[in-house]
Amino acid sequence: MEELRQRLGVLANKDGTPPICPAFKLITKMEEDDAEVAKLISESMMNPEVSIAEIHRELATHGIGISRESISRYKNRICLCSPHCSESLGSGQNG
């Protein structure tokens, strides 16, 4: 499956830039406004004690749009980022 994921990532991203998941895009955008909140979002997504529904609800309540699927992929470390995007944000140790 890893090979399929990588191949589909290349197909979806023909301009040659490395694939970036929606969660990483959201978090890096949030870092511009508030680095602490961005790290808390990443940490909550990586925390096995916090459900995807809880994260999605809190973000949606504050007008932050991201799908549950994107949160799930980030949380389960199956997004297209390599190494996993949470590691570059300093919250990969929790998973």
Image (spheres, grey):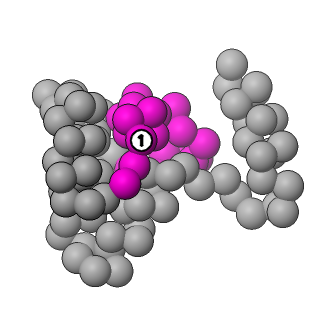
In the visual, does 9 lie left or right of 54? right
Quarter of the image with the N terminus is top right
Give the magenta range.
65-87
Q: Nearer the viewer, residue 95 or 9?
A: 9
Quarter of the image with the C terminus is top left
Residue drawn at the location 59% of the way across and 55% of the way down: 20
> Looking at the picture, how far across and down is residue 69, in whole percent?
45, 33
Residue at which label 1 appears: 67
**Quarter of the view holding residue 57:** top left
> Looking at the picture, how far across and down is residue 67, in whole percent?
42, 41
Residue drawn at the location 17% of the way across and 48% of the way down: 58
In the visual, does 81 lie left or right of 12? left
Asked if residue 75 can be seen in this view, the reply is yes
Q: Nearer the viewer, residue 55 or 4?
A: 55
Above or below for 29 versus 56:
below
The verdict on residue 80 being magenta is yes
Residue drawn at the location 25% of the way across and 73% of the way down: 35
